[in-house]
Image (cartoon, rainbow, N blue to C red):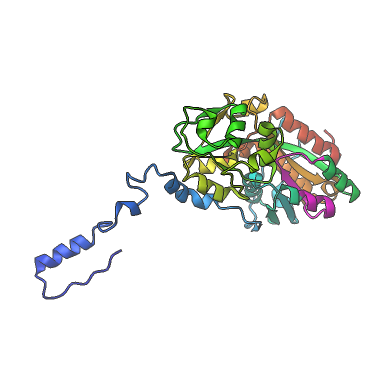
Amino acid sequence: MQLFRCRSIFPLVSWLVLVLTACQPGLNQSNNDSPDTASNANDPYVQFKQERASLKPIIETSSILAPPKTNKINTEQGKVNFPQVQPLDVEGNLLIAGTADIFPLNQSIYDRFVKLGYSGLINFSTIGTDESIKLFCQSGKFDLLTLARPLQDAELAACETNGIEPLNFLIGKDAIVIVVNRQNDFLSKVTIPMLADIFTKNKWSDVNPNFPDKSIERFPVGPGASFDLVVEKVLAGNSDLLLNATNTTLYWYEDPMIQRLSTNIYGVGFLSNSVFKKASNSLKSIVVNGTTPKSMSLADKTYPFERSLYIYVNQKQLTSKPQLSSFVNFYLTHVNEEIEETGLFPISQEDLDKSKQKWLQVMEVTK
């Protein structure tokens, strides 16, 4: 709001003109100051700034207190004879860690748990996949891990050495999408060999003579499960080919990478589909081998960058810590109802039932 002062010597008409002029909103603002003007309507960086709040890196550790209890009880039944948890009766706190890509799903499940009466405290930590696994296997620090890959042999051995019995439950699917600036008008689809060229050659015209004679700007996010998956599929696991290519900038978090790519028409990167869903006003995804990430293409593995999502727990704790077994039960009961809203993908009912059967077997519940 603009402030103005009228002098008494002004004639009444002049005074009214000044008032009306000063009160017109935005009269003295330039078009460039408003993100809604025609000149900025298609500016991807403006779009990015508008959605920035949802793209900030997840804080490393966030404790979420539950609101007061309610009397709502869930009575939904799955495809197997699965006992129903009543969150109102669950007591005790939990520590959960794992990849940030699954955090939105964890949050959705937790919110539902709270709405149905859970009054405990769950601490979510997104310190990264490798560090989470290390702390889980060495000290049992976390009650539950949500991971975008299975534990490796060395990690399983470390858990065994320290008396940890890791037990996994398949909960969903994720996909990595190749992304470019929304105003990139020359790249819409790629093959894996073409993508290998994009990750290693200097100019777009080196990939295809019809592409611009401009340098390829590469913005990978890593290290981590997403980075490893793409490098394995595209460069046979040789990450140096990408990291040592000219005009390559490695980012630890998606937020600054998205910001950079949203202002660079000649850039390329890759993101979890759950993260891309929040950045789709600034970026666009590329069709890979004629497919896009959908439940069907992930199920039949025609989309090359699909990965499975898991819950990991220490089996000893699952059977001795009631709040942990209850939360895993609740997670498996409702995951397919919550997962698609987060940009992740549901598994088949058959696969979900296998996870439920595993819980029943470990908890020695009569089927």
Res 76 seen here: no
Q: Nearer the viewer, residue 101 or 325?
A: 101
Q: Quadrant of the N terminus?
A: bottom left
- The answer to whether residue 196 is left or right of residue 164 is left
Determine the residue positioned at 55% across, 53% down: 56
Determine the residue positioned at 46% across, 36% down: 184
User: Which span is picked out in magenta?
Assistant: 133-152
Determine the residue positioned at 61% across, 43% down: 220
Give the percent coordinates (x, y) of residue 143.
78, 51
Q: Quadrant of residue 166?
A: top right
Residue 230 belongs to the span the image colors magenta: no
- The answer to whether residue 2 is left or right of residue 237 is left
Give the percent coordinates (x, y) of residue 168.
79, 40
Give the percent coordinates (x, y) of residue 199.
60, 36
- The answer to whether residue 226 is left or right of residue 3 is right
Res 155 seen here: yes
| Number of numbered discs | 0
